[in-house]
């Protein structure tokens, strides 16, 4: 049954595409077929995982895998950090909740998943899965081989690792293809952080792992569409060929584990540094605005973000009564990274917001489109393609905008679906 909330999501979908069309470099070349194909691919992927008979078994398997990874990581973390990581406590515990420490319970998971991802890539398991998605995007959305492979890689790898997969083709990408790669990189998340987000949400959300996985997958075609709308491909250009070879290689299984761990460590350090700096800057801003008072409370960055993004959250299909809190989460994601936003979402007790709002925000937050990622992407791409650094700089803020909207589009597509299919 089509409800008012479904209609909100439909309106949000239209508004998102319309805004990107207004910013298009060539409004006469709107990709109608791509628009229909992107929405169809997103809807099909959502229905395939949540609506087909037996899908609950797959969701249960995904959730079990995440729980197993978290438990195994906990053993390794406790071996190194002891009681600080939740091991046997040397004193009486009166508040079990206080034992959770982000540095010891979440960040180590990124190290393990990064090493495991590298190993699966070396064994060609992750590589063939990526190629499968690449063929899907190539056939349904008309992407060139290199672009399709980069888009597929972004679902499982990071926004810097995925360009390495097509490193041999980076100099052949057109401006539109480069923008597409950047946008999709900011629209999705890496497999290592994906598992961490699922672990954060699992205590308060049913099938959290399945939702986070689908969120990163369906944000990819959304990013493709919005990138093509803003920077259309010139007819006769693009379509750089990509074969089954890749610049991302490891010499052995041990080499994959070691290099994967090293790469994961850099991700952990970047996340830690960005969180410390941005959370501190927000706290400093709140202190500076401490004397300001508006309506029934002091003016804070969090309240301002809630007001600004309130209508944006409503357009995804969130009830107006909860749009303020949802808008605040979107603002936190943009300014403080999606990691902080997921922690805040996971910290909202069951019953304080509806299951629908929590689900839609999971999709809307699941992407690297935040201010901190701008510096990371510019730095990484400048190393991989130094001759095109100025081109990257000219496109980065557009890519951030499109990537942010792509996650909102993913939430809107999910909001169009009947709530009953999610259980």
Image (cartoon, grey):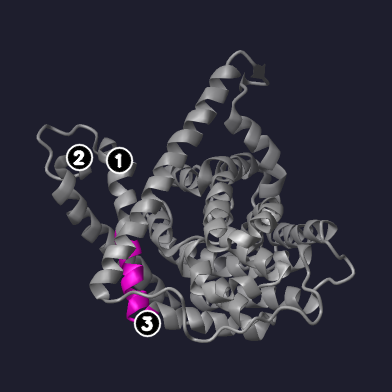
Q: Nearer the viewer, residue 62 or 27?
A: 27
> Which stretch did the figure color magenta?
112-125
Q: Is residue 78 above or below residue 256?
A: above
Q: Secondary structure at mark 3?
A: loop
Q: Residue at x 81, y 60 (%)?
A: 18
Q: Is residue 38 above or below residue 366?
A: below
Badge 1: few (under 14), some or many (20 or more) residues near its Cα, within 10 Å? few
- Residue extending farthest to the left is 90
Residue 101's disc is 1
Task: Point out residue 111 in the picture as x, y percentages from the top left corner.
Answer: 31, 57
Find out whether the residues at labels 2 and 3 contact each other: C-beta distance under 8 Å. Answer: no
Q: Residue at x 71, y 65 (%)?
A: 227
Q: Is residue 288 magenta?
A: no
Q: Secondary structure at mark 1?
A: loop
Task: Point out residue 162 in the picture as x, y percentages from the top left corner.
Answer: 50, 68
Q: Is residue 356 above or below residue 96?
A: below
Asked whether residue 116 appears in the rendered view, the answer is: yes
Q: Which picture quadrant has residue 224?
A: bottom right
Label 3 belongs to which residue?
124
From the viewer's perspective, is 178 left or right of 56?
A: right
Label 2 belongs to which residue?
84
Q: CA distance from mark 1 to mark 2?
A: 8 Å
Q: Residue at x 56, y 45 (%)?
A: 333
Q: Nearer the viewer, residue 74 or 265?
A: 265
């Amino acid at each position: 049954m089509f409800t008012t909330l479904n209609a909100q999501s439909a309106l949000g979908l239209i508004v998102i595409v319309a805004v990107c069309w207004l910013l298009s470099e060539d409004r006469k070349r709107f990709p109608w077929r791509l628009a229909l194909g992107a929405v169809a691919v997103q809807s099909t992927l959502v229905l395939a995982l949540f609506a087909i008979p037996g899908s609950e078994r797959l969701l249960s398997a995904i959730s079990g895998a995440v729980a197993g990874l978290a438990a195994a990581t906990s053993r390794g973390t406790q071996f190194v950090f002891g009681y600080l990581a939740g091991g046997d406590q040397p004193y009486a515990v009166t508040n079990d909740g206080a034992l959770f420490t982000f540095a010891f319970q979440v960040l180590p998971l990124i190290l393990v998943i990064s090493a495991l991802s590298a190993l699966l890539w070396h064994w060609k398991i992750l590589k063939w899965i990526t190629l499968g998605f690449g063929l899907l995007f190539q056939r349904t959305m008309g992407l060139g081989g290199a672009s399709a492979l980069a888009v597929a890689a972004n679902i499982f790898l990071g926004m810097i690792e995925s360009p390495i997969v097509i490193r041999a083709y980076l100099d052949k990408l057109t401006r539109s293809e480069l923008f597409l790669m950047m946008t999709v990189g900011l629209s999705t998340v890496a497999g290592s952080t994906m598992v961490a987000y699922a672990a954060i949400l699992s205590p308060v959300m049913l099938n959290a792992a399945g939702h986070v996985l689908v969120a990163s997958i369906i944000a990819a075609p959304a990013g493709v569409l919005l990138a093509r709308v803003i920077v259309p491909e010139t007819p006769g250009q693009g379509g750089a060929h990509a074969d089954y070879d890749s610049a991302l290689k490891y010499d052995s299984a041990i080499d994959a584990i070691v290099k994967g761990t090293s790469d994961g460590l850099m991700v952990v350090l970047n996340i830690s540094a960005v969180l410390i700096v941005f959370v501190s800057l927000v706290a400093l801003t709140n202190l500076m605005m401490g004397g300001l008072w508006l309506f029934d409370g002091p003016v804070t960055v969090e309240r301002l973000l809630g007001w600004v993004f309130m209508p944006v959250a409503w357009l995804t299909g969130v009830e107006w009564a909860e749009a303020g809190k949802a808008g605040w989460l979107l603002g936190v994601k943009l300014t403080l990274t999606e990691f902080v936003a997921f922690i805040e979402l996971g910290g909202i007790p069951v019953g304080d917001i509806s299951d629908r709002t929590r689900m839609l925000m999971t999709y809307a937050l699941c992407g690297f489109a935040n201010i901190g990622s701008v510096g990371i992407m510019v730095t990484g791409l400048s190393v991989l393609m130094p001759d095109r650094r100025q081109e990257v700089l000219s496109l980065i803020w557009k890519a951030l905008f499109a990537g942010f909207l792509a996650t909102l589009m993913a939430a809107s597509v999910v909001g169009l679906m009947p709530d009953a299919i999610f259980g």
